[in-house]
Image (cartoon, grey):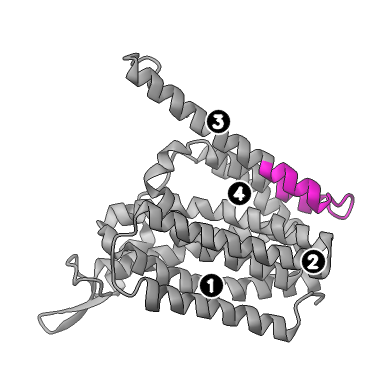
Amino acid sequence: MESIGSPVMWAAFVGFVLLMLALDLGIFHRKSHVVGFKEAAIWSAVWVSLALLFGGWVFLEFGTAKGTEYLTGYVIEKSLSVDNIFVFVMIFGALGIPAIYQHRVLFWGILTALVLRAAMILGGVAAIERFHWLIYVFGGFLVLTGIKMFFTRNHAESPEESKFLKWARRVIPSTTRFDRDRFFTVENGRRLATPLFMALILVEVSDVIFAVDSIPAIFAITTDPFIVFTSNIFAILGLRSLFFMLAGLVDRFRYLKVGLSAVLVFVGVKMLIMDVYKVPAGISLAIILGILGASVWVSLATSRREAAAAAAGDPARAHVRR
């Protein structure tokens, strides 16, 4: 399995991730509190800066090709991880999770996601290395997923209607009562899961589902396990702060899912034709940034027009269908 990552680099990166997680929970978020926009923006800037600094090191150490692969992979994973935010908002809203406890749920949910993604990445790379035809399977899957995302973008299932949640409540003794920031509590001598634990389960399951889409997408850019792993991990590490920064603004990004669906279709087609024509990583990066930038610009422009129409008292223009 060809990779730029040596055992020392793997150990150093994993050690760095563990150190940052320890600082996050043990020092900066030792006590449960409501994460405000300013704090979330600062942490988002920290994670993005660290990811870009790491990318700069890859450029300097291993050349433009590998550096561009890392940066493109990071952009794909970061953009697709934004879709998780829509789901997290619904989960917390449906289960009534207070804002003061949401960081704790996301911390442990994403910690588990890091381990699961690592296993999925290493397994996926090994499978592609051995069975090259899986590239076409992944490519076709991404194209279909992108098309499905486009047509179902306005029809998300409520977490309360989730069959998995209903099954979990039957299997795991639970209560609707909160016990501060605890995942379990005791009622009448019975140990019961609190709504925080149920939210944690849904967060973990949703991330695994999203990983099924996002991990094959980066295989269209590179199969180097070190680049796939590091770009994934940096994208996931910054997801919590991004959630608290954008949670109240998700409705303004109404066309983001249109952009994400186009990205999935593009990388899927890229995988399907890679044995005939390999799209250069630089061109892929430019196309992906162009698609995402356009979807965000159109979303914000539409929101501004609606706000202006509402302020002018024009109800006919105050709402535009997606």
Asked which secondary structure carries label 2, the reply is: helix
Q: Nearer the viewer, mark 1 or mark 3?
A: 3
Q: Is residue 21 visible?
A: yes
Residue on which the image places disc 2:
60
Residue on which the image places disc 4:
145
Span colored in magenta:
266-289
Neighbour tally class for label 3: few under 14, some 14-19, many 20 plus, Cα within 10 Å: some
Q: Magenta segment, principal secondary structure?
A: helix
Identity, as a three-letter code, of the amino acid under mark 3: Val
Give residue 117's position: percent from left, percent from top: 58, 70
For the residues labelled 1 and 3, the Cα–Cα distance comes to 33 Å
Asked where in the image residue 25 lies, by quadrant, the reply is bottom left
Q: Nearer the viewer, mark 2 or mark 3?
A: 2
Residue, x 49% and y 58% (percent of image)? 44
Identity, as a three-letter code, of the amino acid under mark 1: Leu
Q: Earlier in the sequence, mark 2 or mark 3?
A: 2
Q: Earlier in the sequence, mark 1 or mark 4?
A: 1
Q: Nearer the viewer, mark 2 or mark 1?
A: 2
Q: Which mark is drawn over residue 298?
A: 3
Residue, x 40% and y 65% (percent of image)? 106
Identity, as a three-letter code, of the amino acid under mark 4: Thr
Residue, x 82% and y 75% (percent of image)? 2
- 269, 281: nearer the viewer: 281
Asked where in the image residue 124 lies, by quadrant, the reply is bottom right
Residue on which the image places disc 1:
114
Q: Is residue 211 visible?
A: no
